[in-house]
Amino acid sequence: MGQPDPVDARLEAKECRLREANALAANLLRQTIGRLLVTVQDEPIMQETPLEVRADIDFAIEDMHAALRFLESAGHGDGLLAAQPSDGPTRQQGQFLAFIREYMMRNEAGVAPTHAILQQFFNLTAPSVNSMLIRLEKRGFIRRVPGKARAIELTISTDRIPQLDRPFKVR
């Protein structure tokens, strides 16, 4: 037959480089996630780490997992995500969920805590609390009613919510 089309050859080479770049990016993300998870599981380090930094680490891990899922869904995965994260909450998310559950159980009206109460308990800023609640909602762990105070409803199974790491206290 005829000679190979140079345009096809260039496209094939470009696709091959793209697959290699995606595989490299996925491996770098996995390695970084692994290092962060080792740090998060190191009790002495995490006890000395401010809560806002812990939340940022959890957010970074979650975002990296999302980037890996995006690579997979973009059609360049070819099994890149053999070790996908569990669908459960991160450590910090689990603590938020545990506090919300405990607060609602102890409250006669069964209402959720306010943003201010969450800020106080976790020693976080208002934007950090709001960001966490948005992430919990996006992951399907809670449901919020816009425009209604204390309208947080847990949608995650209670057996998937961990215990609070520290005593429940509300001033």
Image (cartoon, rainbow, N blue to C red):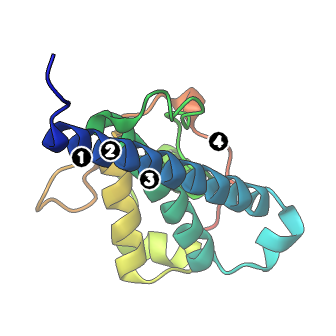
Q: CA distance from mark 1 to mark 3?
A: 16 Å
Above/below status of 124 relative to 95: below
Label 2 amino acid?
Ala
Residue 108 at least partly seen: no
The amino acid type found where label 4 is placed reads: Pro
Compare marks 4 and 3 and give the one earlier in the sequence. 3
Residue 151 place in picture, x, y as percent: 25, 53
Query: What residue is at 29 percent from the left and 48 percent from the top?
Result: 14
Callout 1 secondary element: helix
User: Which of the two residues, 115 or 32, is positioned nearer the viewer here?
Assistant: 32
User: Does residue 36 appear left or right of residue 111 in this picture?
Assistant: right
Q: Can you identify the residue that label 1 sits on?
A: 10
Looking at the image, do the residues carrying marks 1 and 2 touch, with CB atoms under 8 Å apart?
A: yes
Q: CA distance from mark 1 to mark 2?
A: 5 Å
Q: State yes or no: discs 1 and 3 in contact (Cβ < 8 Å).
A: no
Crowd tier of the residue under label 4, counting other residues whose Cα lies within 10 Å: few below 14, some 14–19, many 20 or above: some
Q: Residue at x 41, y 34 (%)?
A: 77
Q: Earlier in the sequence, mark 4 or mark 1?
A: 1
Rendering coords of residue 137 (x, y %)? 31, 49
Which residue is the extreme one toward the left?
147
Q: Which mark is residue 162?
A: 4
Q: Secondary structure at mark 2?
A: helix
On screen, residue 68 above or below 54: above
- The residue where tag 2 is placed is 13
* SS at mark 4 in the image: loop
Vertical placement of 5 versus 151: above or below?
above
